[in-house]
Image: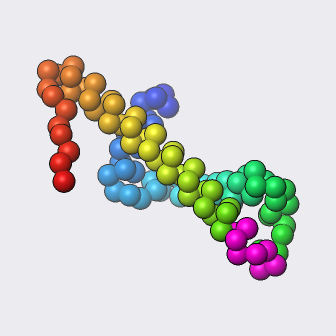
Amino acid sequence: MTLEHVLPDLMSKTAATGLVPRELQAYVAPALEEFRNEMASELGMDDYAHIDKGELPSRLNGKVGGGMTKKMVSFAEAVLAWNYKNRTLLNEAGDKQPEMITE
């Protein structure tokens, strides 16, 4: 089975439950750590992994977390749009109109 077939199924299960699939859970912490260090590097803190975070001003630590959050939200928006687009295309292929979301 190719990644193209597995990934949409995996994303739909994850999006529906809000949980990280078991086979990916071991990768969450190291991926977040790497992401945190990359974000800090973008902000000019090249050695963030080895810096005593207690010695940094809270504003700098907050910029790292805030930058991470902003990028994660953008990524989530892209995933949501991708899923919505594909559902819409499937509905159109089946001569169904996409459902309107009202609140």
Picture coordinates of residue 35, whole percent (x, y):
67, 54
Residue plotted at (85% across, 60% down): 47
Count of marks, rendered view: 0
- Residue 19 relative to residue 100: left or right: right
Q: Is residue 29 visible?
A: no
The residue at the far left in this view is 96
Classify residue 61 as left or right of residue 73.
Answer: right
Q: Which residues are magenta?
A: 54-61
Q: Identify the residue shown where x is 70% and y is 54%.
A: 39
| Residue at 19% across, 32% down | 98
Pinpoint residue 63: horizontal percent, then vertical percent. 67, 63
Residue sitting nearer the eye, 75 or 66? 66
Nearer to the camera, 45 or 96 = 45
Whether residue 85 is in magenta: the answer is: no
Above-or-below relation of 99 to 51:
above
Horizontal side of residue 91 vs 70, given as left or right: left
Farthest residue in the bottom direction? Answer: 54
Residue 60 highlighted magenta (yes or no): yes
Residue 17 appears in the rendering: yes
**Residue 45 percent across, percent down from the top left:** 82, 59
> Compared to 41, does 86 lie above or below?
above
- Horizontal relation, residue 46 to residue 69: left or right: right
Query: On the rendered image, what quadrant is the N terminus found in?
Result: top left
Q: Which colouring convention does the figure follow? A: rainbow
Name the residue nearer the viewer: 88 or 61: 61
Q: Position of residue 65 (x, y in %)?
A: 63, 63
Q: Main secondary structure of the magenta part?
A: helix
Kindly identify the residue that appears in the image at 73 percent across and 68 percent down: 60
Q: Quadrant of residue 81?
A: top left
